[in-house]
Image (cartoon, rainbow, N blue to C red):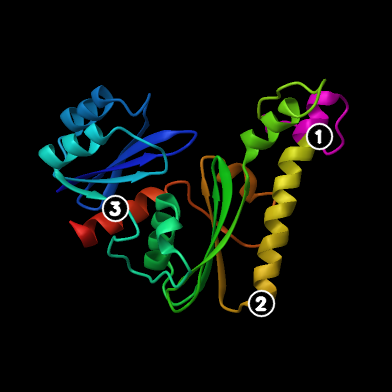
Amino acid sequence: MKTVCLDLGNTRMKAALFDNGILTDSILLEGDGIETIQSIVNDYKPDKSILSSVIHHSPEIERILEERTRFHKLSHLTKLNFTVPVGKPETMGADRLALAAAVVYSFPSKNNLVVGLGSCITYNFINKYSQFLGGGISPGMEMRLNSLHDYTALLPVVKKDWNFPLIGYDTRTNILSGVILGMAKEIEGIIDSYSDKYRNFNVVLTGGDCTYFAHLFKNKIFADPDLLYKGLYAISETNN
């Protein structure tokens, strides 16, 4: 049984294929056009599909998936392995729901903080009773790098580069040190704040850059760049 998991994010659009529960392939999509989705369905020939989207995608995407697969669109109405006791659960992003589902499945009966590194940094806290209580959102790396250029007269746009010194020696390395180490210290500080309040505490770092950040922390954390895919697959199994 094959399941394709589609994640349409603000910065990147991705797809992953599970074959009988095993992640066998993942790709970056060139866009959310109808041709792209048709190509995914034709190449993978999935039995099931699930869509997580935080953008305004074409309704035709859902139509194609409904016609060709057993389809589920992730939303606040989705059956989940956790509860969302917040004021407006319908405002919780689909990507954050998927991360919560994955961590509850992988680390049950623990207090879990999932840190997602994407367009934004999301802090997603699920307690030991499998309640998604919320968390926080702050700017991601590219947003920080671009904003330094957009809101100043002279600072350039700097592309991310993991080869930078603690003490920057020119404008570029000053920006890299400030942004990347600043993010690391922000994340570590928030982890410490949660650790002070909760016991039996677990931290999972995910997103495309998670493996680069993991070594910068003194706290013991799990780094899993595929966590969102695993959450989408688990949700698909429950709802399909």
Q: Residue 125's spot in the image, x, y percent?
A: 53, 66
Which residue corresponds to mark 2?
A: 197
The overriding secondary structure of the stretch rendered in magenta is loop
Spot the residue most to the left: 67
Spatial separation of the CA atoms under disc 2 and disc 1: 34 Å
Q: Quadrant of the C terminus?
A: bottom left
Q: Who's the residue at 79% across and 39% down the image? A: 178
Which residue corresponds to mark 1?
A: 165
Q: Of the residues under marks 2 and 1, which one precedes in the sequence?
A: 1
Q: Residue 25's spot in the image, x, y percent?
A: 31, 37
Q: Who's the residue at 68% across and 61% down the image? A: 190
Q: Nearer the viewer, residue 4 or 162?
A: 4
**Dot 3 crowding, Cα within 10 Å, few <14, some 14–19, many 20+:** many
- Range of magenta residues: 161-176
Disc assigned to residue 232? none
- The answer to which quarter of the image holds residue 219 is bottom right
Image-based side of 103 in relation to 48, left or right:
right
- The answer to which quarter of the image holds residue 237 is bottom left
Look at label 1 and name its amino acid: Pro
Q: Who's the residue at 75% across and 29% down the image? A: 151
* In magenta segment, residue 96: no
